[in-house]
Image (spheres, helix red, strand yellow):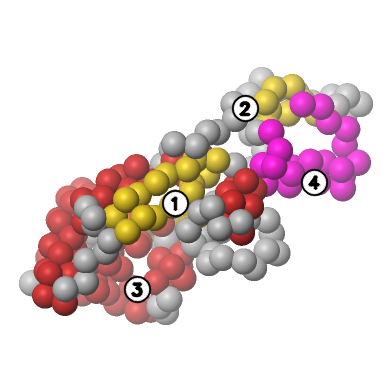
Amino acid sequence: MYDPTQLRTFLAVAQTLSFTRAARRLGLRQSTVSQHVRRLEEATGRRLFTRDTHRVELTVDGEAMLGFARTILRAHERAAAFFTGTRLRGRLRFGASEDFVLTRLPEILESFRRDHPEVDLELTVELSGTLHRRLEAGRLDLVLAKRRPGDTHGELVWQSTLTWIGAPSLRLDPGRPVPLIVFPPPGITRARALEVLEEDGRPWRIAWYERQPHAA
């Protein structure tokens, strides 16, 4: 009843909350993504998203469809692997930036282990700069990490804008250094923040180092 292709598109939109980003992730046209979602909504007879020019959100039925879609796709993938005889085996050394570990990554890794029980998955949590160096040195097979603007290595999964964050009561004195809470080197976000301050001619000081990520 439910087309796996449409379900994959639905999940991409649900994860990004953007038809544009989902299209970029899947390598499809935005009109194709919209068509897939519309056909899935026709099949269910329910609205799965509310959307306007500024925002995309899951409806209550869309939240319910999340679980069904994942279950259907897992069953589809297991059936395909069984009948084609392609079971993954071996070791995968995977590195992830701590930023991503705090999001949906544990759920994704749990699903990977369940679907590929014969793969020995080794997880390393580190700063993005450290992960890139370990990948280049052959100490990791795959990383999910940030990269600097203009870098072209790896595959771009999504793009976001860095934002300065401070307490609501914070008032910066233009004549005094900007106090910063940062990761230690070689953090990519840290390096970019300092570059921007230097380019603007703003003095700065490190007020606090966030704890160093660790391997696991």
Magenta stretch encompasses residue 204: yes
Q: Are marks 2 and 1 in contact (CB under 8 Å)?
A: no
Figure check: 31 above or below 81: below
SS of the residue under disc 2: loop
Query: Which of label 4 and label 2 is nearer to you?
Result: 2
Q: Is residue 123 visible?
A: yes
Q: Position of residue 10 (x, y in %)?
A: 28, 64
Relative to 131, 45 lies left or right? left
Query: What's the residue type where badge 1 is placed?
Result: Phe
Magenta stretch encompasses residue 132: no
View extreme (left): residue: 1
Mark 4 crowd level (few <14, some 14–19, many ≥20, 10 Å Cα) = few
Residue at image point 29% right, 77% down:
35
Residue beneath disc 2: 210
Q: Are marks 2 and 3 in contact (CB under 8 Å)?
A: no
Give the distance between the C-alpha atoms of the residues marked 1 and 3, in whole angstroms.
Answer: 30 Å
SS of the residue under disc 4: helix
Q: Is residue 189 visible?
A: no
Q: Nearer the viewer, residue 144 or 70?
A: 144
Give the residues drawn in magenta, as a range.
184-206
Figure check: 173 above or below 28: above
Query: What's the residue type where badge 3 is placed?
Result: Val
